[in-house]
Image: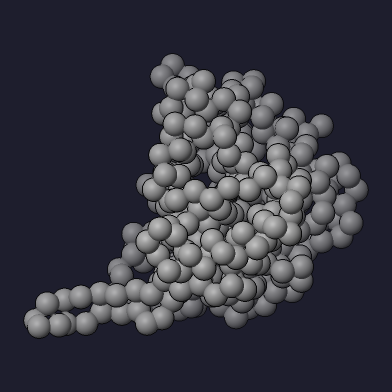
């Protein structure tokens, strides 16, 4: 097949890890006789420095015209002033909105070779393989009214948690489609005992579940889910929830694997939207340029790109198997290395994954 992939290296370690993911995608194309054209655009802090805009129109045009977008990371201390009129994160929010992506997909999978890296006991994380589906464009992060005021001389802030049934239904449908390809179980997380918005969420979730009787379904309150992720994470398959709850729970679950450097993500929309793929670890400015960053989350994000945007499930599985093989062979970047281990560089880890593909 022929495909155009837009690369947005961004800030911090972004360029380093995107380079390794591109290397893997190029190897996949060579192995299977595909043609991948790569185009690179500015985004984030580097785009602010060079153009004054965290998402220049030229970059946005590349993204909209391509088949998929692979993002490194955005942000850093030099752009972190919350009072600044222009911030890197504004570019990310605009990109998501422009692409029409509304479902954030975060797999949390414990590789057997890394079970001892988890802060939980190895027997508790054995066989953990969860996919979080987080609603991405609604809820309390976007609800109106939102703001701050001074009342009786005291500062106050307010946010609105709002969901309509269409926003809920479409992200639930994504979760049920994913479950049909996996273990056939969906867990919907809400706070329906307290929040009106969650009661609407639960009503719609039950309606969607009734349309998919072949899928096992359950409701779990968000505070209970926070506990279950620690004491029985292996019981879950696909977990779907709103924007804020998903943000918190997926970050909690990420530590089950022992390193943020192992976790990919995808932001998906309707059938005609362009998927956005990125590692969840951020720009890590403290190690940028040292060649020690873990590229595996970005490489696994590229595997998600192959599967979800290009329909190349076999190639995606090959990349995931190659990552598992490299880890089984004992190769570790600095974030994964234990005392006495020799850590490999970002570049060498990418080279090892490529070698394992052939």
Q: Quadrant of residue 158?
A: bottom left
In terms of depth relative to the viewer, which is nearer, 248 or 277? 248
Res. 331 visible in picture: no
On screen, residue 30 versus residue 282, left or right, reads right
Q: Residue at x 25, y 74 (%)?
A: 157
Q: Quadrant of residue 206?
A: bottom right
Task: Give how far across and how far down residue 196 sits, in percent.
Answer: 43, 69
Q: Residue at x 51, y 20 (%)?
A: 123
On screen, residue 153 versus residue 197, left or right, reads left
In terms of depth relative to the viewer, which is nearer, 138 or 347? 138
Q: Quadrant of the C terminus?
A: top right
Q: Is residue 44 above or below residue 53?
A: above
Q: Quadrant of the N terminus?
A: bottom right
Looking at the picture, the colour scheme in use is one colour
Direction top: furthest residue: 340
Task: Give how far across and how far down residue 263 sits, in percent.
Answer: 55, 43
On screen, residue 205 versus residue 22, left or right, reads left
Q: Is residue 80 above or below residue 228?
A: below
Q: Residue at x 70, y 39 (%)?
A: 183
Q: Is residue 109 above or below residue 4?
A: above
């Amino acid at each position: 097949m022929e495909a155009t992939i837009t690369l947005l290296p961004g800030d911090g370690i972004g360029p380093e890890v995107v380079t390794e993911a591109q290397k893997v995608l190029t190897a996949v194309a060579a192995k299977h006789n595909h043609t991948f054209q790569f185009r690179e655009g500015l985004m984030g802090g580097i785009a602010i420095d060079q153009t004054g805009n965290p998402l220049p129109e030229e970059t946005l045009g590349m993204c909209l015209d391509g088949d998929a977008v692979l993002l490194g990371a955005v942000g850093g201390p030099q752009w972190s002033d919350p009072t600044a009129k222009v911030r890197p994160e504004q570019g990310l929010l605009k990109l998501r909105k422009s692409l029409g992506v509304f479902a954030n997909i975060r797999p949390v999978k414990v590789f057997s070779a890394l079970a001892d890296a988890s802060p939980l006991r190895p027997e508790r994380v054995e066989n953990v393989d969860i996919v979080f589906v987080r609603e991405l464009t609604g809820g309390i992060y976007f609800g109106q009214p939102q703001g701050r005021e001074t009342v009786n001389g005291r500062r106050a802030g307010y946010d609105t948690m709002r969901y309509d049934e269409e926003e809920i239904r479409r992200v639930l449908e994504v979760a049920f489609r994913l479950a049909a390809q996996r273990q056939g179980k969906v867990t919907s997380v809400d706070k329906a005992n307290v929040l009106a918005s969650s009661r609407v969420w639960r009503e719609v979730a039950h309606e969607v579940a009734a349309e998919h009787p072949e899928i096992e379904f359950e409701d779990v309150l968000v505070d209970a889910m926070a506990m279950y992720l620690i004491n029985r994470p292996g019981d879950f398959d696909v977990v779907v929830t709103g924007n804020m709850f998903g943000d918190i729970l997926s970050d909690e679950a990420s530590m089950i694997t022992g390193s943020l450097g192992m976790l990919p993500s995808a932001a998906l929309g309707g059938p005609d939207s362009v998927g956005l793929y990125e590692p969840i670890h951020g720009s890590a400015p403290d190690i940028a340029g040292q060649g020690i960053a873990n590229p595996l989350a970005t490489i696994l994000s590229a595997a998600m790109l192959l599967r979800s945007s290009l329909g190349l499930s076999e190639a995606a599985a090959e990349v995931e198997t190659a990552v598992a093989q490299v880890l089984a062979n004992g190769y570790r970047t600095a974030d994964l290395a234990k005392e006495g281990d020799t850590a490999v560089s970002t570049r060498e880890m990418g080279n090892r994954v490529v070698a394992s593909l052939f």
